Image (spheres, rainbow, N blue to C red):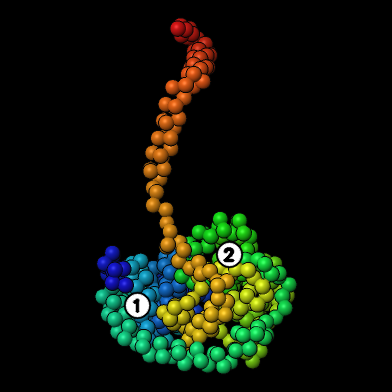
Amino acid sequence: MTALFRRRRAVVDGGPGTSGPARVDPRTKNLTKRLRPGDVAVIDHEDLDRVSAEALVACRPAAVLNAARSTSGRYPNLGPGILVEAGIPLVDDLGPAVMSVREGQQLRLEGAEVHTGDRLVAEGTVQDASTVEANLDKAREGLSVQLEAFAVNTMDYVHRERDLLVNGVGVPKVRTTFEGRHALVVVRGYHYKEDLAMLRSYIREYRPLLIGVDGGADAIIEAGLRPDMIVGDMDSVSDKALTSGAEIVVHAYRDGRAPGQRRVEDLGVEHVVFPATGTSEDVAMLLADDLGAELIVAVGTHDTMIEFLDKGRAGMASTFLTRLRVGSKLIDAKGVSRLYRTRISTWQLVILALAGLLALFVALATTNVGQTTFGLAGAWFDDLVNFFRSLVGIAPAPTT
């Protein structure tokens, strides 16, 4: 994070002129669906994560107002730094009063104070490069506690899900055929857009089954593709994706409760229910593995402690053990766009093309065939010039 602020220490003071219509939602991922440039985003998001911050930046709001603390100190989350780096004013710890603002109400930010008209709505803490860095330093001290919690969570998951992990007990029957095929599991995680774009040639050649995990299905559609299957609790996937013809697998709790099932039923879409502990991306991988997928390629999935804390989960045992179960079948494509990027500029390509044409010209000029070709081309050009001269009443040029 320190390097991030060295590149650009943007000081955000939320001074006069920072104003706009309020867009209010306690769930950031829902808010970004309707947030427009110039709006003021009002959220209630403790420990603002990287993916949510990047989605906010893409919407280009005038400011982000957080009722909660953007960094609580549990772990070093990257969201606040991303907003500050983008030059977007961030005021957090405003309290529940700011969530009472009406949708579309005009807000004005003056330092740490939020006003509507002449009324003070709430006062919080302005975040800038220095405060974000200080918060991260304090949060790093709490990682040992989180690591211990992950270890405990892992043992608990083994006890609860050993039949599913070892024998595949509980995996539902689906109509999609996985046997002998590749499966591409897409999650809206870090760098998912860039990584999905880098895999286009692989998708064209191998035609893998495209599995969208909740909002990952929309990512597949945005890339100009169609998902074959959607797995998740259906809280962040669009109706367009759910009605795209993909097979729907609703991830349910172990006791059978499936909050997302009602939504799918209301849309009249056929579906199956998969009760399992863990994350929906784990469920997608276990399903593909158990049904005979030859290879599983994962894009945007979560596999580190920071990423799981960013996701708001108390532990990563499900993913840790799922990856042990899937084993060598799993190819993690997350970050492939950062691993390789072309370093050839447009000008370099132009110069290379010109050099190639020059080499071709020289090669032709030294052969009889090339000289004959150039002679014919020259005669054709002379005829064309004389034709246009005759059109305007000028005598043809003398031939040599």
The N terminus lies in which quarter of the figure? bottom left
292 versus 165 height, above or below: above
Nearer to us in this view, 130 or 205:
205
Is 236 rendered above or below residue 318? Answer: above
Question: What residue type is disc 2 on?
Answer: Ile
* Disc marking residue 91: 1
Image spot of residue 167 (x, y percent): 65, 85
Residue 112 lies in quadrant: bottom left
| Label 1 element class | strand
Q: Is there a contact, CB below 8 Å, between mark 1 and mark 2?
A: no
Compare marks 1 and 2 and give the one earlier in the sequence. Answer: 1
Looking at the image, can residue 234 be seen? no
Please determine whether, in this image, residue 227 is positioned above or below residue 133.
above
Apparent side of residue 299 relative to residue 167 in the rendered image (left or right):
left
Identified at 57% across, 71% down, the residue is: 329
The one of 93 and 5 positioned closer to us in this rendering: 5
Asked if residue 264 can be seen in this view, the reply is yes
Q: Amino acid at mark 1?
A: Val
Q: Which residue is mark 2?
A: 220
